[in-house]
Amino acid sequence: MLTLLEDKIATPLGPLWILCDETFHLRAIEWEEHSDRMEQLLDIHYRGEGYARVAAQNPGGLSHKLADYFEGDLSVIESLPTATAGTAFQREVWQALRTIPCGHVMHYGQLAEQLGRPGAARAVGAANGSNPVSIVVPCHRVIGRNGTMTGYAGGVQRKEWLLRHEGYLLL
């Protein structure tokens, strides 16, 4: 059985759940108001082997590191370890998301091309939308081809805030 250590931190965008395994690899990050989505993803990925959620304060220092990100240390998320479940394609997309530099964005088609799958923009969008480790796997850095703030599970306002915070959007 997988033990998931969980903590919740306050952020400028609302409470944020942080779940990691016992080796302190992030398994899920989700806004409190969307915790039902997180629970669905946990069930999809870990129900087979079984899992237990256990409250923990700042497991592996992850809570403090994410708080540091919100306080302006933007590079802190680049080195945080993840261990995400999902299909091989989803994990490939999520790994590619981590290569988008802070303060930059891509559109779904560009990300599909980078993966050697031109024309797979919709599949990339679907994988992006099922990312269980938001912020650290920066799905908010993917926008529509025309520059619109499309498809962020945490809400477009949060996506815009994160992109402003990272210096892509100006106030």
Image: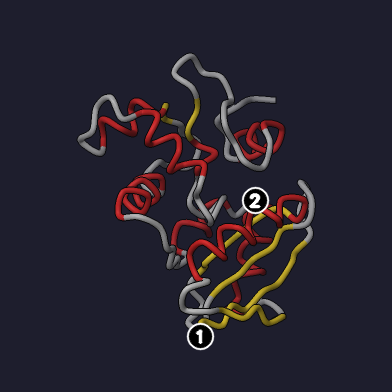
Extreme residue toward the front, this view: 48
Density class for disc 1 (Cα within 10 Å; few <14, some 14-19, many ≥20) is few
Density class for disc 2 (Cα within 10 Å; few <14, some 14-19, many ≥20) is few
Kind of residue at badge 2: Gly
Kind of residue at badge 1: Met
In the rendered image, which quarter is residue 71 located in? bottom right
Is residue 37 placed above or below 83 in the rendered structure? above
Residue at (23%, 33%) from the top-left corner? 117
Rendered location of residue 134, percent (x, y) = 56, 51
Q: Earlier in the sequence, mark 2 or mark 1?
A: 1
Rendered location of residue 84, percent (x, y) = 44, 63
Rendered image: mark on residue 148: none
Extreme residue toward the left, this view: 116
Q: Nearest the camera: 16 or 68? A: 16
* Residue of label 1: 1
Q: Is mark 1 on a helix, strand or loop?
A: loop
* Residue of label 2: 72
**Which of labels 2 and 1 is toward the front?**
1
